[in-house]
Amino acid sequence: MFERVNPSHPDKLADRIAGALVDFAYDIEDNPKVAIEVLIGHGLCHIIAETSVQFDYNTIKKIVRRIAGPDMELIYDEYPQDIHLAENQAEEIHCGDNGIFKGSPLTREQIMLSSLARKIYYYCPTDGKYIIDGNNLIICQSNATEEKLRSICPTATKINPLGYWTGGTDTDTGATNRKLGSDMADGVTGGGLHGKDLSKADVSANIFCHLLAQKLGKVVTASCAIGDTDLTVYVDGWTKKFPYKEVVREAEKFIDSLGGFEKLAEWGLF
C-alpha cells in the first residue's frame, strides 16, 4: 500500500516554497542555517523563518506567487537562529538536531506508482493524489475528466470517486512536511525533510539512509544527537559511524543532482 501526491498538491506547494527559500539562502550565503515553516490556503501564505540570513520580502513574494499563483497574499515572519544552535555550528558542521531515521529499499509497487504519478502530472499539471493497494489503484486528479484519465491509466479501479473537482489551495490547506509518506515511502523520520539547510539531520541523515538502503538492498536505521560529529548507522546486525561531514556531502550531491531544494520538494526522495 502506498500513496503519492504530485507537486501541485497544497502540501507540496508549501514544501516547494520552503525549498525555494532554502535555495535562496544558499544563493546569499555558502553555509546558511535556516528552518522554514509554510502554511498556505485560501489565498494566503504564512511563512515563519528561523534564519542566519536576511531574506528580501519582495523576492519571497515572487517565489510564493510563482509557485502558488499570482493572487496569493503573503505574511512573512523572520527570526534569528537560536544563539546556542548557531554556536554549535560555528567552527565546523555538526549534527544539527536529535533524530532517528530509517531508509528502506523501494518496492516495485512504490516505483510503479511514482512513475505513474509523474506521467499523469505531465498531462495534467494540477493537484492530484494517487493510491495503490495490491490490485486496487485509485486516481484522484483535479481539473481532468474521467475519460482523459482513463486514457492515461486504463487499469485504474477508481477515478475521482466524488466526480470532477478543481483542487488546489482554494479547496484545501497545505503545510510543510505533511506528506512525508509520499516523499519517503517506507522511510521513517523524527522530523521533516523540507525547509531546512544541510546541517539539519532531518535533511542529510534522511537522504543518506535512503541512498544507503537502495545501495545495499536492506533496511538502514540511524540515530544522532545534536552536536555529534558522526551519524550512527545500523544495518542487518552491524553498526558503523559515518562522519557527519560525509553524510552532508552525500546529501548535497543528491540535492544538486535534482536541481536544488525546491526540486527535492516536488517529489521527495524518488
Image: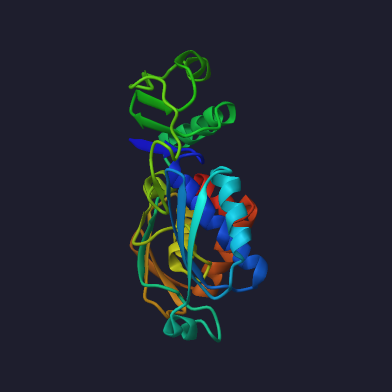
Identify which residue is drawn at 34% across, 23% down: 135
Q: Quadrant of the N terminus?
A: top left
- Left or right: 181 as drawn, with respect to 53: left
Counting from the top left corner in percent of width and height, residue 138 is at: 37, 25
- Looking at the image, the residue that sits furthest to the top is 147
Counting from the top left corner in percent of width and height, residue 46 is at: 45, 56
Identify which residue is drawn at 54% across, 56% down: 19
- Looking at the image, the residue that sits furthest to the right is 27
Identify which residue is drawn at 46% across, 45% down: 43
Residue in front for this viewpoint, 198 or 85: 85
- Count of labels shown? 0
**Figure check: 157 above or below 248:** above
Counting from the top left corner in percent of width and height, residue 103 is at: 41, 54
Residue in front for this viewpoint, 96 or 209: 96
**Figure check: 72 above or below 189:** above
- Left or right: 12 as drawn, with respect to 54: left
Residue in front for this viewpoint, 85 or 168: 168
